[in-house]
Amino acid sequence: MGTSPVWPLSVFFAAILALVAGMLGASALLGPRHREAATDEPFESGVVGVGQAPFRFPAKFYMVAVAFVIFDIEAVYLLAWAIAFRGLGWTAYGGATVFVGALAVALAYLWRMGALDWGPARTRRSGGR
């Protein structure tokens, strides 16, 4: 048998570790050493915050964010499929159709469960009143 195909991966991994260690070491040696009152404070656009945040984000905000990421990745897969469409044939078209159908079912489920609603929760009325 010939040489193992694992050694290039090992060299690449070692090079990445050396690069990361070098960058962290250079940052520790060359970085600024001043400590001010606002050094550890969170800020946005260079403005130091005053007081606490005015409100907390609800869990639905994060659900919408996760759904957005999932459907954004779906767009990347469909773009790659569309670019290679002519070479893939009808079998890939069927697979893409099933893929889009599954995503449509997932979107309908999210919509039905109210994961995409931004407004306040609606109260359900009982049938007799």
Image (cartoon, rainbow, N blue to C red):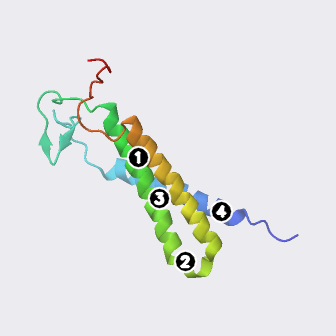
Q: Amino acid at mark 2?
A: Ala
Which one is closest to the eye, mark 2 or mark 4? 2
Kindly give the residue lying farthest to the bottom in the view shown.
86
Which quarter of the rendered picture does the C terminus lie within? top left
Dot 3, how many residues are within 10 Å of its Cα: few (below 14), some (14-19), or many (20+)? some
Mark closest to the chain's N terminus, 2 or 1:
1
Q: Which circle marks residue 84 in the picture?
A: 2
Dot 1, how many residues are within 10 Å of its Cα: few (below 14), some (14-19), or many (20+)? some
Q: Amino acid at mark 4?
A: Leu
Q: Tell me, yes or no, whether the two marked residues, 2 and 4, touch with CB atoms within 8 Å.
A: no
Q: Residue at x 25, y 47 (%)?
A: 32
Of residues 25 and 118, the one nearer the viewer is 118
Mark closest to the chain's N terminus, 2 or 3:
3
Mark closest to the chain's N terminus, 3 or 4:
4
Q: Which circle marks residue 74 in the picture?
A: 3
Camera sees residue 38: yes
Cα gap from disc 2 to disc 1, whole angstroms: 26 Å
- Left or right, residue 31 beside residue 75: left
Vertical position of residue 90 compared to residue 113: above or below: below
Task: State the image coordinates of residue 83 (x, y, percent, origin top left).
Answer: 50, 77
To which residue does mark 1 refer? 67
Task: State the image coordinates of residue 84 (x, y, percent, origin top left).
Answer: 54, 77
Dot 4, how many residues are within 10 Å of its Cα: few (below 14), some (14-19), or many (20+)? few
Q: Amino acid at mark 3?
A: Glu
Vertical position of residue 32 compared to residue 93: above or below: above
Mark closest to the chain's N terminus, 1 or 4:
4
Q: Tell me, yes or no, whether the two marked residues, 1 and 3, touch with CB atoms within 8 Å.
A: no
To which residue does mark 4 refer? 9
Which one is closest to the eye, mark 3 or mark 4? 3
Of residues 87 and 95, the one nearer the viewer is 95
